[in-house]
Image (tube, coloured by chain):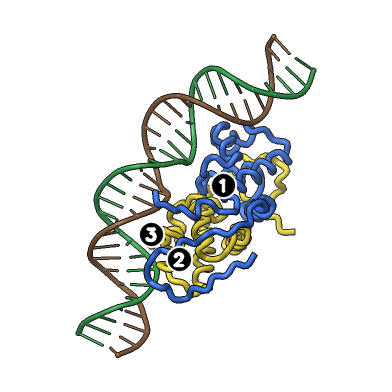
Chain colours: A blue, B yellow, C brown, D green
Amino acid sequence: MAEILDFKRTPEPLWREALGRKLRETREDRGDRLVDVADRAGISVQYLSEIERGRKEPSSEMIAAVAGALGIDLADLLIGVAGQVRHLRVQQVSHFHTSRPAGRPSGPVAMAWAA
Amino acid sequence: MAEILDFKRTPEPLWREALGRKLRETREDRGDRLVDVADRAGISVQYLSEIERGRKEPSSEMIAAVAGALGIDLADLLIGVAGQVRHLRVQQVSHFHTSRPAGRPSGPVAMAWAA
DNA sequence: CCCGGCTTCTGCTGGTAGCAGAACGGCCCC
DNA sequence: GGGGCCGTTCTGCTACCAGCAGAAGCCGGG
């Protein structure tokens, strides 16, 4: 696996984590059980459980199937996940190093993320 | 005539496709080359190319790395992708009787409820 | 106590993420 | 013409993990 190293410790939550939380929230708002959604989406219940807990990386087709089973479209889901990201990202506002690959002074380097 | 639409194909774009488009758009807005972003993200250039074209399914860590290399945070990225989804869907929504979702979805469902 | 809902363990298989290397086509400019 | 630059696409390879089944565990409530 490509050593991502520095970027693995992102202060932000990962995509799959925020997605899982949003999916669970949506399901619970509907009053559905895991087995209900899993059946409708055509996936196993334990796998859906793992998706909701952010432990596995669902494929695009899986995401579409689960979203469909929840009666939500992808765009709305993404907006909701973005909200989750914002909500979850509070703990570490630390700085992280962009490990520059020792080489070429790549031209337009003007990155500045101010806190 | 009377082309029967293939409903196996979700009218919505897949997550990876919309994500790829948004990533490319963001990179081009910055005036970056593939190699610039790939180096900063610590991934190979051909793989980044495939991600941007929606051909491969990037892991959460990859998404974070690329987003970081683009100087955009995950929440903003997701909002942008949601916009992509909406934009890409317009073409096919032309005539779709959006029946009330009151029933039960029997599979992956795509609803358009524009207020 | 049992039952319904969720989690978690083991184990298995196929698919594919992700890499390197290289070749190719489209540009643009000397 | 030809030489860079940039992106795409091919081959090939390995390691990892999605996704399933089966079953057991946990916990609250009737």
Percent across and percent down for residue B84 are 58, 62
Q: Is residue D22 left or right of residue D28?
A: left
Q: Are marks 1 and 2 in contact (CB under 8 Å)?
A: no
Label 1–label 3 contact, CB within 8 A: no
Which mark identifies residue A16? 1
Quadrant of image for the C terminus of chain B: bottom right
Q: Nearer the viewer, mark 1 or mark 2?
A: 2
How many labels sit on residues?
3
Q: Is residue A75 visible?
A: yes
Real-space CA distance between mark 1 and mark 3, rounded to the nearest whole angstrom: 22 Å
Q: In the rendering, at what x and y percent does residue A113 appear?
A: 59, 67
**C30 in relation to D16, above or below:** below
Percent of width and height locating residue A7:
50, 55
Query: Local crowd at mark 3 within 10 Å, few (<14), some, or many (≥20)?
Result: some
Q: Chain of mark 2?
A: B
Label 3 in the same subunit as label 2 = yes
Quarter assignment of residue A42? top right
Amino acid type, label 3 = Ser
Which residue position holds label 3?
B44
Q: Which type of secondary structure does the marked residue at label 1 adopt? A: helix
| Residue plotted at (73% across, 43% down) | B102
Q: Position of residue A60 (x, y in %)?
A: 52, 49
C-alpha separation, residue under disc 1 versus residue under disc 2: 22 Å
Q: Distance of mark 3 from mark 2, alpha carbons? A: 10 Å
Residue displayed at 58% across by 42% down: A54
- Residue type at mark 1: give it: Arg
**Do marks 1 and 3 share a subunit?**
no
Q: Which residue is depicted at the point 69% across and 43% down?
A: A26
Q: Which residue is mark 2?
A: B37
Task: Give the side of residue A80 with respect to residue B71, left or right.
Answer: right
Q: Nearer the viewer, residue B110 or A95?
A: A95
Q: Chain of mark 1?
A: A
